[in-house]
Image: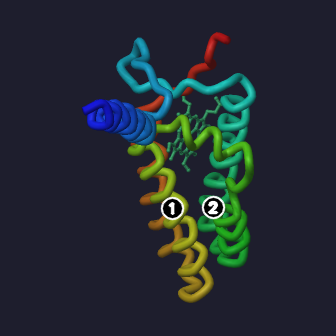
Amino acid sequence: MNNIKALWVIIVVLSTIVVGVGYQVVMGSTVRSADGRTAIVLTKDERNFVLGEMRGLLGHMQQLVTAAADKDIDKTIAIAKILTGDTKGEKQVSIIAKTPLHFKKITKNIHSQFAELYEDAMTKRDVDYSLKQVSVIMQNCIACHGAYTLVEDKE
Ligand code: HEC
Protein backbone atom coordinates (compact mmCIF):
# COMPACT_ATOMS: atom_id res chain seq x y z
CA MET A 1 0.00 0.00 0.00
CA ASN A 2 2.79 2.39 0.99
CA ASN A 3 4.63 1.50 -2.21
CA ILE A 4 1.62 2.50 -4.30
CA LYS A 5 1.36 5.80 -2.43
CA ALA A 6 5.05 6.45 -3.00
CA LEU A 7 4.59 5.62 -6.68
CA TRP A 8 1.75 8.13 -6.97
CA VAL A 9 3.86 10.80 -5.32
CA ILE A 10 6.63 10.11 -7.85
CA ILE A 11 4.16 10.20 -10.74
CA VAL A 12 2.70 13.53 -9.58
CA VAL A 13 6.16 15.07 -9.05
CA LEU A 14 7.41 13.89 -12.45
CA SER A 15 4.24 15.09 -14.21
CA THR A 16 4.63 18.50 -12.59
CA ILE A 17 8.23 18.69 -13.84
CA VAL A 18 7.23 17.62 -17.37
CA VAL A 19 4.40 20.15 -17.50
CA GLY A 20 6.72 22.82 -16.08
CA VAL A 21 9.44 22.15 -18.66
CA GLY A 22 6.85 22.03 -21.45
CA TYR A 23 5.38 25.33 -20.29
CA GLN A 24 8.86 26.91 -20.22
CA VAL A 25 9.57 25.68 -23.79
CA VAL A 26 6.27 27.02 -25.15
CA MET A 27 6.08 30.28 -23.18
CA GLY A 28 9.74 31.07 -22.44
CA SER A 29 10.33 33.77 -19.82
CA THR A 30 7.65 36.24 -20.79
CA VAL A 31 5.23 38.77 -19.37
CA ARG A 32 2.56 40.86 -21.07
CA SER A 33 3.82 44.32 -21.95
CA ALA A 34 1.74 47.49 -21.54
CA ASP A 35 1.41 47.90 -25.34
CA GLY A 36 -0.13 44.43 -25.70
CA ARG A 37 2.93 42.67 -27.10
CA THR A 38 4.64 39.79 -25.33
CA ALA A 39 7.69 40.99 -23.39
CA ILE A 40 10.61 38.56 -23.22
CA VAL A 41 12.46 39.03 -19.95
CA LEU A 42 16.26 39.02 -20.37
CA THR A 43 19.25 40.17 -18.34
CA LYS A 44 20.71 43.57 -19.25
CA ASP A 45 23.64 41.90 -21.10
CA GLU A 46 21.39 39.53 -23.02
CA ARG A 47 19.05 42.34 -24.06
CA ASN A 48 21.95 44.53 -25.20
CA PHE A 49 23.39 41.58 -27.09
CA VAL A 50 20.12 40.91 -28.96
CA LEU A 51 19.60 44.60 -29.76
CA GLY A 52 23.18 44.79 -31.08
CA GLU A 53 22.49 41.79 -33.34
CA MET A 54 19.31 43.52 -34.52
CA ARG A 55 21.15 46.70 -35.48
CA GLY A 56 23.58 44.51 -37.40
CA LEU A 57 20.63 42.91 -39.21
CA LEU A 58 19.22 46.30 -40.19
CA GLY A 59 22.60 47.32 -41.60
CA HIS A 60 22.86 44.11 -43.61
CA MET A 61 19.35 44.51 -45.00
CA GLN A 62 20.28 48.03 -46.13
CA GLN A 63 23.40 46.66 -47.85
CA LEU A 64 21.31 44.01 -49.62
CA VAL A 65 19.01 46.72 -51.02
CA THR A 66 22.03 48.75 -52.17
CA ALA A 67 23.55 45.66 -53.82
CA ALA A 68 20.29 45.07 -55.72
CA ALA A 69 20.07 48.74 -56.80
CA ASP A 70 23.69 48.54 -58.02
CA LYS A 71 22.97 45.21 -59.77
CA ASP A 72 25.95 43.84 -57.84
CA ILE A 73 25.25 40.13 -57.34
CA ASP A 74 28.69 39.48 -55.81
CA LYS A 75 27.88 41.98 -53.07
CA THR A 76 24.51 40.25 -52.53
CA ILE A 77 26.34 36.92 -52.21
CA ALA A 78 28.89 38.37 -49.78
CA ILE A 79 26.22 39.88 -47.49
CA ALA A 80 24.01 36.79 -47.66
CA LYS A 81 27.01 34.68 -46.66
CA ILE A 82 27.56 36.83 -43.55
CA LEU A 83 23.87 36.45 -42.65
CA THR A 84 23.97 32.64 -42.91
CA GLY A 85 26.87 32.59 -40.43
CA ASP A 86 25.17 34.81 -37.84
CA THR A 87 24.08 33.96 -34.31
CA LYS A 88 25.85 30.90 -33.03
CA GLY A 89 27.41 30.79 -29.59
CA GLU A 90 27.07 30.13 -25.90
CA LYS A 91 25.25 33.31 -25.00
CA GLN A 92 22.43 32.47 -27.38
CA VAL A 93 21.62 29.21 -25.58
CA SER A 94 20.44 31.00 -22.43
CA ILE A 95 18.61 33.62 -24.50
CA ILE A 96 16.89 31.01 -26.69
CA ALA A 97 15.68 29.21 -23.55
CA LYS A 98 13.87 32.40 -22.52
CA THR A 99 12.11 32.94 -25.83
CA PRO A 100 8.68 31.43 -26.54
CA LEU A 101 8.14 28.70 -29.13
CA HIS A 102 6.59 31.05 -31.71
CA PHE A 103 9.61 33.39 -31.45
CA LYS A 104 11.94 30.41 -31.98
CA LYS A 105 9.92 29.45 -35.07
CA ILE A 106 10.25 32.91 -36.63
CA THR A 107 13.99 32.87 -35.87
CA LYS A 108 14.38 29.46 -37.49
CA ASN A 109 12.36 30.62 -40.47
CA ILE A 110 14.47 33.72 -41.08
CA HIS A 111 17.69 31.72 -40.80
CA SER A 112 16.57 29.17 -43.38
CA GLN A 113 15.54 32.07 -45.66
CA PHE A 114 19.01 33.64 -45.29
CA ALA A 115 20.50 30.28 -46.34
CA GLU A 116 18.13 30.15 -49.31
CA LEU A 117 19.01 33.73 -50.30
CA TYR A 118 22.69 32.77 -50.32
CA GLU A 119 22.21 29.50 -52.25
CA ASP A 120 19.92 31.09 -54.86
CA ALA A 121 22.18 34.12 -55.33
CA MET A 122 25.08 31.74 -56.02
CA THR A 123 23.16 29.59 -58.52
CA LYS A 124 20.78 32.07 -60.20
CA ARG A 125 22.97 35.23 -60.05
CA ASP A 126 19.80 37.29 -60.45
CA VAL A 127 19.69 40.49 -58.32
CA ASP A 128 15.98 41.04 -58.92
CA TYR A 129 15.18 37.55 -57.66
CA SER A 130 17.36 38.17 -54.58
CA LEU A 131 15.69 41.52 -53.90
CA LYS A 132 12.28 39.84 -53.97
CA GLN A 133 13.59 37.30 -51.44
CA VAL A 134 14.85 40.15 -49.24
CA SER A 135 11.38 41.67 -49.18
CA VAL A 136 9.91 38.31 -48.15
CA ILE A 137 12.59 37.91 -45.46
CA MET A 138 11.66 41.32 -44.04
CA GLN A 139 8.15 40.07 -43.34
CA ASN A 140 9.78 38.10 -40.49
CA CYS A 141 11.18 41.35 -39.04
CA ILE A 142 7.70 42.88 -39.15
CA ALA A 143 5.92 39.82 -37.73
CA CYS A 144 8.32 39.47 -34.82
CA HIS A 145 8.45 43.17 -33.91
CA GLY A 146 4.66 43.28 -33.95
CA ALA A 147 4.45 40.45 -31.43
CA TYR A 148 7.45 40.85 -29.10
CA THR A 149 9.39 43.34 -27.06
CA LEU A 150 12.44 42.83 -24.83
CA VAL A 151 12.57 43.90 -21.20
CA GLU A 152 15.30 43.69 -18.55
CA ASP A 153 14.71 41.62 -15.45
CA LYS A 154 14.85 43.74 -12.31
CA GLU A 155 17.17 41.51 -10.23
C1 HEC B 1 12.23 36.51 -33.94
C2 HEC B 1 11.99 37.91 -33.65
C3 HEC B 1 12.68 39.00 -34.42
C4 HEC B 1 13.05 39.01 -35.74
C5 HEC B 1 12.85 37.93 -36.79
C6 HEC B 1 13.66 40.29 -35.98
N1 HEC B 1 13.66 41.04 -34.84
FE1 HEC B 1 14.43 42.92 -34.64
N2 HEC B 1 13.85 42.95 -32.69
C7 HEC B 1 13.13 41.95 -32.06
C8 HEC B 1 12.76 42.41 -30.74
C9 HEC B 1 11.94 41.61 -29.73
C10 HEC B 1 13.27 43.71 -30.59
C11 HEC B 1 13.11 44.63 -29.38
C12 HEC B 1 11.89 45.49 -29.64
C13 HEC B 1 11.40 46.17 -28.40
O1 HEC B 1 11.86 45.87 -27.27
O2 HEC B 1 10.50 47.02 -28.54
C14 HEC B 1 13.96 44.02 -31.83
C15 HEC B 1 14.60 45.22 -32.09
C16 HEC B 1 15.16 45.58 -33.31
C17 HEC B 1 15.83 46.83 -33.58
C18 HEC B 1 16.09 47.94 -32.57
C19 HEC B 1 17.49 47.78 -32.00
C20 HEC B 1 17.81 48.74 -30.86
O3 HEC B 1 18.98 49.01 -30.66
O4 HEC B 1 16.88 49.19 -30.16
C21 HEC B 1 16.19 46.81 -34.89
C22 HEC B 1 16.92 47.90 -35.67
C23 HEC B 1 15.75 45.54 -35.45
N3 HEC B 1 15.12 44.82 -34.44
C24 HEC B 1 15.92 45.15 -36.77
C25 HEC B 1 15.49 43.95 -37.29
C26 HEC B 1 15.54 43.60 -38.70
C27 HEC B 1 16.05 44.50 -39.79
C28 HEC B 1 15.04 42.35 -38.81
C29 HEC B 1 14.84 41.49 -40.02
C30 HEC B 1 15.92 41.32 -40.96
C31 HEC B 1 14.67 41.90 -37.47
N4 HEC B 1 14.95 42.91 -36.59
C32 HEC B 1 14.13 40.68 -37.21
C33 HEC B 1 12.82 40.72 -32.56
C34 HEC B 1 13.05 40.31 -33.87
Give the x, y percent position of residue 123.
57, 88
* Residue 146 in view of the camera: no
- Mark 1 C-beta to ligand 1 under 8 Å: no
* Residue 77 in view of the camera: yes
Kindly identify the amino acid type of the residue bearing the numbered disc 1: Val
Secondary structure under tag 1 reads helix
Query: Residue furthest toward the front?
Result: 1
Circles 2 and 1: CB atoms closer than 8 Å: yes
Q: In the rendered view, tell whether residue 136 sits above or below residue 19.
A: below
Crowding at dot 2, Cα within 10 Å, few <14 / some 14-19 / many 20+, comes out as many
- State the residue position of label 2: 64
Residue 65 lies left or right of residue 132; in this view the side is right
Q: Earlier in the sequence, mark 2 or mark 1?
A: 2
Residue 1 lies left or right of residue 60; in this view the side is left
Q: Dividing the image into 4 quarters, which one contains the C terminus?
A: top right
The quarter of the picture where residue 34 lies is top left
- On the rendering, which quadrant does ligand 1 occupy? top right
Give the x, y percent position of residue 144.
44, 40
- State the residue position of label 1: 134
Residue 89 lies left or right of residue 4; in this view the side is right
